[in-house]
Image (cartoon, helix red, strand yellow):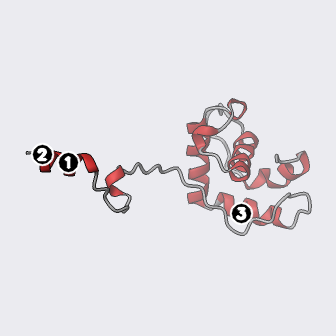
Amino acid sequence: MELTDAQYERIAPLLPTPRGSLTIPHRQALNALLYVGKEGCTWRGLPPRFGNWHTVYVRINRWAKRGVLERVWRELQGDQGAARHLEALSLDSTIIKLHAAGSGAPRKRGAKRSAARGAG
């Protein structure tokens, strides 16, 4: 799922004017966002064809905070070429590691432990 030429031409005026040189074009960053949304992968899981994942993430995050993405989605919603109607899209970059003892499962009382206590 990638933006067509016609779709990108419609939303290009809504995107911020680049400051300095861009290593990743705006269209490529938007296509990366669509890829993450469609595939459900993490930002780190972006294929190399989209460029550096961190660069894409920072730009998309900045656009989300400034309302750029909301304006873009509103413009594209009326487009029949859009593959999906997006009412809400949540992207999360957090990873939570849980220790085995923190899972809430009941503790196993091992036979080795009981046997070791009784042997003494």
Q: Which residue is mark 2?
A: 119
The dot on residue 46 is none
The local crowd at label 3, few if under 14, some if 14 to 19, many if 20 or more residues have their Cα within 10 Å, is: some
**What's the residue at 74%, 59% (across, down)?**
72
**Label 2 crowd (10 A; few <14 / some 14-19 / many >=20):** few
Q: Are marks 1 and 2 in contact (CB under 8 Å)?
A: yes
- Element carrying mark 3: helix
* Secondary structure type for disc 1: helix
Identify which amino acid the numbered label 1 is placed on.
Ala
Residue 84 point in image, percent of width and height: 82, 61
Return the residue nearer the eye: 68 or 58: 58
Earlier-in-chain disc, 3 versus 2: 3
The disc, 3 or 1, on the residue closer to the chain's N-terminal end is 3
Amino acid type of the residue that numbered disc 3 sits on in the rendered structure: Arg
Q: What is the CA distance from the residue labelled 1 to the residue labelled 2?
A: 6 Å
Q: Which residue is mark 3?
A: 71
Q: CA distance from mark 3 to mark 1?
A: 67 Å
Residue at point 69%, 53% (across, down):
37
